[in-house]
Image (spheres, rainbow, N blue to C red):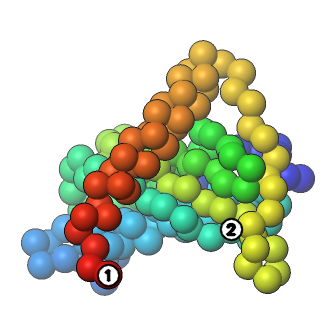
Amino acid sequence: MPGQDRETALRFLAEPADVNFGGKVHGGAVMKWIDLAAYACAAGWSGRYCITAYAGGIRFVRPIHVGSIVEVMARVIYTGRTSMHIGIEVRAGDPTTTDRERTTHCIVIMVAVDRSGMPVPVPEWVPESEKDKELRESAIRLMEMRKKIGAEMEAHLEL
C-alpha cells in the first residue's frame, strides 16, 4: 500500500564480473545497485513506476572487495509533489560475519510517473522523530545547493 513503507534494503554478492582494473568493485556496479535500491524504495512508497531524476553527492568512502556481501539501504527522507528524495547508504563486509562497514552514501531523487511518462503525485512523507526531521531539513538544504550548482554549471555547457 503506497505511503506505508519508506525503507528498502537490497543485498548483493560482489562478483568477479564487478571488478575494476584496481581489483576492487567498480564504482559503476555500486551506482547500479544504488539506482536499483532507490527505485525499489520509491516505487514501494509511491505505488508507481518511478524514474531517476538525480543522483548526487556520491561519496565512495572505502572500496568493496570481490566476494563481499553488499547491503544497500534506501530510505525516503523527503517528498515533493511528484518526487521522492531517497537517502542511500551502502555497507559491505565478509559474508561469513555480520560485520558491515559503510562504503558509499548519496542522495537519489526519484519521480513517480504514469503510463505515458508524466509525473504524478506521491504520498507525502511526514517526519516524526527528531532524526527524521533533521534528514528532511538536510534534503531541503541540498535542494537549494543543487539549484546554485545547476546555475554555475550552465557556464560549462555549450549551446
1 or 2: mark nearer the eye: 1
Examine the rendered structure and indicate whether residue 36 appears above or below residue 7: below
x, y percentage for residue 93? Answer: 33, 51
The C terminus appears in which quarter of the rendering? bottom left
The dot on residue 50 is 2
* Res 29 → quadrant: bottom left
Q: Nearer the viewer, residue 106 or 70?
A: 106
Q: Which residue matches tag 1?
A: 159
Marks 1 and 2 in Cβ contact (< 8 Å) = no
Above or below for 75 versus 49: above
Q: Compute the Cα span from label 1 to label 2.
A: 30 Å
Q: Does 51 sit above or below residue 144? A: below
The one nearer the camera, 151 or 30, is 151
Report whether 93 appears left or right of 134: left
Label 2 element class: strand
- Residue 15 seen in this snapshot: yes
